[in-house]
Amino acid sequence: MTDAPIAIRFATAADLAALHPVIERAYRGDSARKGWTHEADLLDDQRTDMATLEAILANPETRLLVAERDGAIIGCVQITDKGEGTSYLGLLCVDPDLQAGGLGKLLVAAAEAEARRGFAAERMEMTVIDLRAELIRYYERRGYVVTDEKRPFPVVVEPPLTFAVLVKAL
């Protein structure tokens, strides 16, 4: 990769084949361990699949943004309208070889701007596996606040995992 400008834009169906492996590399497996935001030590299943990504694109209450440099997809973030002025930030990922370079910050800022513009959101919510203290601190540095709410992890794993809920006023 070069230092060429990064474009953040809405994902299209044509992006999904290139995006899917970036998501998997960022979250799971040995390649994820190159970065610092992975779940590879907690989970070994697939993070997502093409059908789920296609459903995200088809859902009018969801936006999927991709980061692109030199024609290559290098990250993404999903924004979902939860109603009542709340949007949800999820599926944030950056190619592990490019983490810690500021792209995550750009994607979070783009997601927040799109939540305000596209959904008239007044606050952004997210969930983070509560064992991931370093990642929670990353979001706290971006203005997110850990609430007292915990949510169950959607897949049964041992030991059981739970999500911490973080919120930021937009």
Image (cartoon, rainbow, N blue to C red):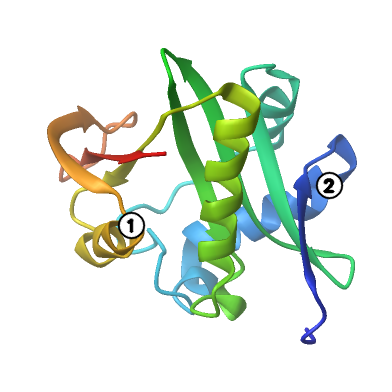
State the residue at coordinates (78%, 84%).
1
Residue labelled with disc 2: 15
- Spot occupied by residue 26 in the image (x, y as percentages of width and height): 54, 62
Left or right, 140 with respect to 80, comes to: left
Above/below status of 61 relative to 155: above
Front-lying residue, 13 or 32: 13
Q: Is residue 52 visible?
A: no
Mark 2 is surrounded, within 10 Å at the Cα level, by few (under 14), some (14 to 19) or many (20 or more) other residues, namely few
Of all residues, the one furthest to the bottom in this rendering is 2
Quarter of the rendering occupied by the C terminus: top left
Q: Sequence-wise, which precedes: disc 1 or disc 2? A: 2
Left or right, 161 with respect to 51, comes to: left
Mark 1 is surrounded, within 10 Å at the Cα level, by few (under 14), some (14 to 19) or many (20 or more) other residues, namely some
The numbered dot on residue 139 is: 1
Of all residues, the one furthest to the left in this rendering is 148
Circle nearer the viewer, 1 or 2: 1
Query: Tag 2: residue type?
Result: Asp
* CA distance separating discs 1 and 2: 27 Å
Left or right, 108 with respect to 133, comes to: right
Above/below status of 162 relative to 19: above
Of all residues, the one furthest to the top in this rendering is 84
Query: Tag 1: residue type?
Result: Tyr
Above/below status of 52 relative to 8: above
- Spot occupied by residue 11 in the image (x, y as percentages of width and height): 78, 42
- Spot occupied by residue 87 in the image (x, y as percentages of width and height): 46, 28
Which structural element holds mark 2? helix
- Spot occupied by residue 38 in the image (x, y as percentages of width and height): 41, 63
State the residue at coordinates (88%, 73%).
70
